[in-house]
Image (spheres, helix red, strand yellow):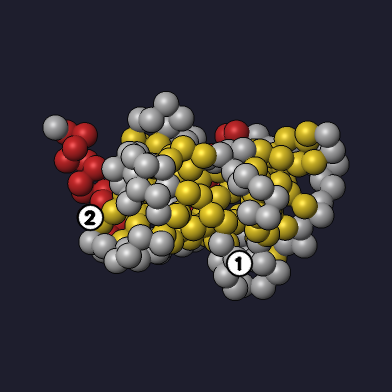
Amino acid sequence: MRIAVALCALVTGSAAHAAGDISLQISAGQLITTKISEDGQPLGPDRVFSGMFSSVSGTWYTDEPGIQIEPGTLAPVSTLQFFFTRALRQWNGSSFELVSGPRVGATFGPPTNSILTPVTDTDSPNLLFPVESNGGLHDHPDWVLEGFDPGVDPFYFLVEARFSTTQPGLEATSPFYIVFGVNGDEAELDALEQYVRDQVIPSPAGPLAIAGLAWMIRRRR
């Protein structure tokens, strides 16, 4: 059974979500994850993103999702820090409860600025993204799936991560999620994104709800 069909009961009535880069806003002293299109159009607060690995010279690789922060959001020349917070999960046909043997790596710039999903549910080291002089950035890390040979079958994996910053006075984001596909289908990837929103993430509260309201107000204006 195709995943998009198998998840129908869980996502019935949910609107499709466009693919996009990870962005950030600040609300009540906390970093809040939002989604933004590649051409810079805000898509609203979100905690689920996605990417599809492709085989490049024998390596399962993608540069999506990227990270795109609007100018003026962060302090110039501060550092944005990305880190994994749990071991990689693999879709087992009904949930992401299966702890995966493969690992996802992320690299930006020099090979030394590289991290892997941990083997247990603990924080990884930080992957560093220098904030530009205008207080924003637009970078695409190299995401790689390591230790896995899928053949021709589709597989889907779930990463949990957070952002923090060296800028004083700002709390790290709540955990957010990236669904990665291998030999996958875009419709199934979209369905799994919505599954994570509906079944993995707690109900929105606090800064996320406030950021969502502010975004709606700006859109109406």
Residue at 41% from the left image edge and 60% from the top image edge: 165
Toward the top, the furthest residue is 39
Left/right of residue 99 with respect to residue 34 in the rendered view: right
Task: For label 1, count other residues whose C-alpha is less than 10 Å away and answer few (under 14), some (14-19) or many (20+).
Answer: some
Disc 1, SS: loop
Instruction: Name the secondary structure under disc 2.
Output: helix
Q: Label 2 amino acid?
A: Ile
Judge by depth and name the residue closer to the eye, 31 or 208. Answer: 31
**Where residue 190 appears, x then y in whole percent?**
53, 39
In this rendering, does residue 175 appear at all? yes
> Which residue lies under the disc numbered 2?
210
Quadrant where the C terminus lies?
top left
Question: In the visual, does 96 lie left or right of 57?
Answer: left
Residue 172 figure quarter? bottom left
Q: Measured along the vertical axis of the image, is residue 75 above or below residue 164?
A: above
Q: Amino acid at mark 1?
A: Ser
User: Is residue 203 among what the camera can see?
Assistant: no
User: Quarter of the image containing the N terminus?
Assistant: top right
